[in-house]
């Protein structure tokens, strides 16, 4: 039935602008971001010359997605050090910009530790800044490598779970090249299946309220030439009921030690649907997203976002700006209260497998998760 749906226009381009890069300008280094609030209408770059600009970009979701937040955080520390700002102040501001995606704190910590170690060994400011930059580049490079490994492991797992190919994969939020130095997490696996001629359809949840699926995943899928269909989040149930979904592939923002998975709000309902319909629910995330210090799902802090993201409809590039709360079209009565958690938490018993760069965790148990993380190169 999937193939009778309207096929979105497909192309074969990859991202024309990388999602994030470090650039040395004559007036000093900068972090350049592809402003994701403006996609898919416009490809506009944001040039961050200081840490407050980068923090603002993180909070407004101009730069977003767990692995990319780790990379942004690490370069943010390097930027502060290179430009002579207060590094400890920068560390604090960056790490606290968003609370759920553990990669942000991870990237910040790696660059900050490198900076502090250099200072402790008597390095001057330029050498300590260089040490922070080397570490940020390492975080970036490791993410690229992890992305490729996750795609390999994920493909092998799909082969086991769904022998015969022709996969119809449902995904939620955005997990491709926009959130990574490489090809991403869950979308990297779908992309590998597509290249192998094994992806029949990518079902793209629009992902309310900020439409990361409709705006960003569809943008990536179109560029990769994948056959994809965007659906409203509420339509997923009827897709499962009609036998149209072979597997769910999503990313993660934080995975607790017990295997509970925090990801974009709307992921947990998909896991419940998947279990009811006996469809594999697979999470793809690097081990840097696993937080063994968070014991269980209930301990994960879930970011609460402005209610206006729900009570208004804010389209990208409307009025020449990104999707900014307070500038959209009201879709609820003035003064309506809104419940707007950015993420939800899926318990481990609903997760078929967690695919990491270091291997696959299945069944999802505390011990197996710890074991896989201990073999990670940077654990
Ligand atoms: O609020 P966002 O857009 O940063 O949320 C992103 C997600 O929930 C992604 O699914 C998650 O970071 C995994 S990305 C590899």
Image (tube, rainbow, N blue to C red):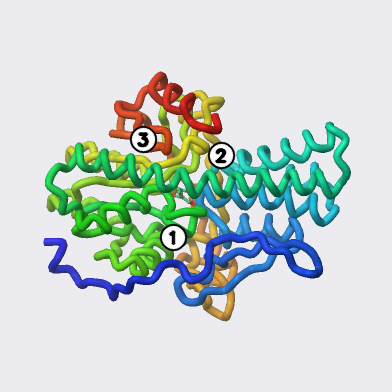
The residue drawn where x is 86% and y is 39% is 123
The residue drawn where x is 37% and y is 31% is 347
Instruction: Check the image and report above or below for 44 versus 134.
Output: below
Numbered tag placed on residue 212 in the rendering: 1
Mark 1 residue element: helix
| Viewer-side label of 3, 1 | 3
| Viewer-side label of 1, 2 | 2
For residue 306, say whether it is visible.
Answer: yes
Query: For this rendering, which residue is in front, 307 or 210?
Result: 210
Marks 2/3: CA distance? 16 Å
Q: Please provide percent x and percent y for residue 75.
A: 67, 52
Quickly name the residue at label 3: 354
Quickly name the residue at label 2: 102
Report whether the residue tagged 1 is closer than 8 Å to ligand 1. yes
Specify the farthest residue to the bottom.
Answer: 319
Q: Give left or right: position of 298 versus 114.
A: left
Mark 3 residue element: strand
Q: Earlier in the sequence, mark 3 or mark 1?
A: 1
The residue drawn where x is 50% and y is 23% is 295
Q: Quadrant of residue 227?
A: bottom left
Numbered tag placed on residue 29 in the rendering: none
Q: Give left or right: position of 215 versus 141.
A: left
Mark 2 residue element: helix
């Amino acid at each position: 039935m999937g193939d009778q749906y309207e096929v979105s226009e497909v192309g074969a381009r990859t991202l024309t602008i990388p999602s994030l890069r470090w650039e040395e300008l004559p007036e000093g280094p900068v972090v350049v971001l592809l402003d994701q609030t403006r996609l898919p209408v416009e490809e506009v770059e944001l040039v961050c010359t200081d840490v407050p600009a980068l923090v603002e970009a993180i909070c407004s979701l101009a730069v977003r997605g767990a692995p990319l937040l780790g990379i942004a955080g690490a370069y943010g520390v390097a930027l502060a050090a290179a430009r002579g700002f207060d590094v400890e102040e920068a560390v604090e501001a960056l790490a606290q910009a968003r609370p759920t995606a553990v990669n942000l704190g991870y990237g910040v910590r790696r660059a900050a530790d490198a900076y502090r170690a250099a200072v402790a060994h008597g390095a001057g400011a330029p050498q300590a800044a260089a040490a922070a930059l080397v570490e940020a580049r390492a975080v970036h490079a490791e993410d690229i490598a992890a992305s490729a490994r996750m795609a390999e492991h994920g493909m092998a797992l799909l082969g086991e779970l769904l022998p015969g190919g022709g996969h119809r994969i449902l995904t939620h939020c955005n997990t491709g090249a926009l959130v990574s130095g490489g090809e991403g997490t869950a979308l990297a696996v779908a992309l590998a299946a597509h290249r192998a001629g094994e992806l029949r359809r990518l079902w793209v949840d629009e992902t309310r309220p900020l439409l990361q699926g409709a705006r960003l995943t569809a943008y990536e899928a179109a560029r990769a030439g994948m056959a994809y269909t965007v659906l409203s989040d509420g339509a997923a149930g009827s897709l499962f009921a009609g036998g149209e979904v072979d597997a769910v592939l999503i990313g993660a923002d934080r995975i607790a030690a017990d295997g509970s998975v925090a990801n974009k709000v709307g992921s947990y309902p998909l896991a419940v649907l998947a279990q009811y319909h006996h469809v594999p629910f697979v999470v793809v995330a690097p081990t840097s997203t696993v937080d063994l210090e968070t014991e269980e799902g209930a301990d994960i802090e879930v970011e609460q976002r402005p209610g206006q993201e729900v009570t208004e409809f804010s389209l990208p590039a409307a009025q020449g700006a990104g999707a900014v709360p307070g500038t959209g079209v009201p879709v609820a009565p003035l003064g309506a209260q809104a419940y707007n958690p950015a993420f939800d938490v899926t318990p481990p018993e609903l997760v078929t497998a967690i695919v990491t760069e270091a291997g696959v965790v299945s069944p999802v148990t505390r011990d197996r998760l710890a074991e896989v993380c201990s073999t990670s190169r940077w654990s």
